[in-house]
């Protein structure tokens, strides 16, 4: 240290100290300028397009419309904050907030009511307060028009926040093929599989002997004109009607609660929907299966395709007959022959333990069911058994966002719902079908 100080102190006392100090100052100034230039380059901001931007797009020949445009970029995972995600962009949240935009799906829940989702080990809470839009994870609306008022410009899908809507990101309906990420049907497969494999609670000998079939319906103006068809069928065979339509019997007034109890006493249950649309199969078939009787259904050209919901040779499809009279004769023939009748319930004859089956998880139930009906039938490969996971609709979405990166979800192109003119048969088609067949014969 002394070797450095002595020469410096000598130099400072000499007459050359002024030029020396000026040289040192210039060098220090140059170093300071270079440091600032380098630091400015390192701090230059990088434009990050990882956000949801809603902009107005205008075509030359079309009116101005507001269209959500996603401009997104994958960034490193964000495990901190209100919307934690992993490195792939999958949600790590364990509690979600769901806004019921038009009061349909969460109508039976109280504000803030918590729901558990066992499949993902998470929970969610309902809210109907639209001023909480900045905090919600999902906005649920019943249809496209109900979602038009959603403030898309306030929603984000990026590394910092992932907010999804039924009006833009997801479509979940009874349609098995067009739903994303998966359908939301009328079927609880945990129950439906057990009902299918359970033996009939009322044996053939004890079924009602006054009437062949039962019908319980309150909508007397169905789109497909089923009430006119049933009225025509009543002229051929005895049918007991407990509902508000064509009523000729008292005793079961409830729309749903008592249906299975009434159904099980009859050999056949008329389970025709109010419209004939692709995959539109509701509780009418569910309750008919629960009763252990043979369903009478209406499916034409895949609208709907009952092979997707039932084993083969387990129901009567009215469109398989050229006339109502021919159908009636077949119903009487089957209903008067025990062996023939029970051949339609063939899938109920097995060695499975129903009590044990009820305790099994869904995947194991499906394996047991496939052992009985076969793994390659339409119901298993393309139908309800392979597509319906039977849990709360919101829980399905939560499971999906925890398994799927947000970028993949945001880039998915939502398919519009099929036009009713394509997905459904025309109004009052049932009788028109039989009338057409009769005209061709003449």
Image: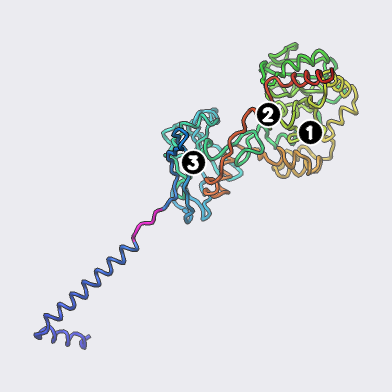
In the image: residue 279, left or right of residue 40: right
Q: Name the residue under label 2.
A: 277
Residue 442 location, x and y as percent?
84, 17
Instruction: State left or right for residue 178 relative to residue 140.
Output: right
Residue stretch rendered in magenta on the structure = 43-47
Q: How far apart are marks 1 and 3 (CA)?
A: 41 Å
For marks 3 and 2, the one nearer the N-term is 3
* Quadrant where the N terminus is found in the figure: bottom left
Q: Mark 2, residues whose alpha carbon is within 10 Å: few (<14), some, or many (≥20)? A: many
Give the quarter of the image for residue 232.
Answer: top right
**Which residue is at the far top?**
248
- Check contact, mark 2 vs mark 1: CB within 8 A: no
Q: Which mark is residue 198?
A: 1
Residue in view at x 83 percent, y 32 percent: 313
| Nearest to viewer (mark 1 / mark 3) | 3
The residue carrying mark 3 is 137
**Relative horizontal placement of residue 293, taking residue 149 as reference (left or right):** right
Q: Residue 385 carries which label?
A: none
Dot 1 crowding, Cα within 10 Å, few <14, some 14–19, many 20+: many
């Amino acid at each position: 240290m002394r070797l450095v100080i002595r020469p410096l102190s000598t130099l400072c006392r000499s007459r050359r100290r002024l030029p020396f100090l000026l040289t040192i100052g210039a060098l220090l100034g140059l170093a300071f300028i270079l440091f600032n230039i380098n630091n400015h380059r390192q701090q230059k901001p990088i434009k990050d397009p990882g956000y949801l931007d809603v902009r107005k797009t205008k075509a030359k020949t079309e009116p101005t419309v507001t269209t959500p445009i996603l401009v997104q970029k994958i960034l490193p995972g964000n495990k901190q904050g209100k919307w934690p995600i992993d490195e792939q962009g999958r949600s790590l949240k364990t509690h979600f907030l769901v806004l019921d935009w038009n009061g349909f799906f969460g109508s039976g829940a109280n504000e803030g009511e918590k729901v558990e989702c066992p499949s993902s080990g998470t929970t969610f809470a309902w809210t109907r307060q639209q001023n909480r839009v900045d905090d919600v994870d999902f906005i649920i609306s019943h249809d496209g028009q109900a979602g038009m008022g959603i403030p898309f410009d306030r929603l984000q899908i990026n590394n910092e926040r992932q907010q999804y809507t039924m009006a833009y990101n997801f479509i979940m309906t009874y349609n098995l093929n067009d739903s994303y990420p998966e359908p939301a049907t009328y079927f609880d497969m945990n129950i439906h599989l057990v009902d299918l494999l359970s033996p009939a609670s009322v044996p053939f000998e004890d079924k009602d002997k006054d009437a062949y079939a039962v019908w319980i319906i309150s909508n007397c103006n169905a789109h497909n004109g089923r009430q006119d068809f049933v009225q025509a069928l009543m002229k051929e065979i005895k049918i007991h009607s407990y509902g508000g339509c064509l009523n000729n019997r008292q005793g079961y007034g409830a729309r749903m609660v008592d249906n299975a109890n009434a159904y099980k006493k009859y050999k056949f249950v008329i389970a025709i929907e109010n419209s004939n649309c692709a995959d539109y199969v509701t509780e009418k078939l569910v309750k008919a299966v629960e009763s252990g009787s043979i369903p009478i259904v209406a499916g034409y050209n895949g609208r709907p395709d009952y092979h997707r919901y039932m084993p083969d040779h387990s129901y009567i499809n009215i469109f398989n007959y050229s006339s109502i009279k021919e159908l009636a004769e077949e119903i009487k023939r089957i209903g008067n022959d025990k062996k023939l009748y029970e051949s339609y319930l063939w899938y109920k004859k097995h060695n499975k333990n129903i009590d044990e089956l009820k305790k099994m998880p869904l995947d194991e139930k499906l394996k047991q069911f496939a052992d009985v009906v076969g793994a390659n039938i339409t119901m298993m490969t393309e139908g309800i058994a392979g597509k319906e996971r039977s849990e709360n609709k919101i829980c399905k979405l939560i499971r999906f966002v925890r398994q799927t990166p947000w970028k993949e979800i945001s880039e998915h192109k939502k398919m519009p719902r099929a036009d009713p003119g394509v997905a459904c048969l025309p109004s009052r088609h049932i009788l028109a079908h039989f009338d057409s067949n009769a005209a061709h014969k003449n």
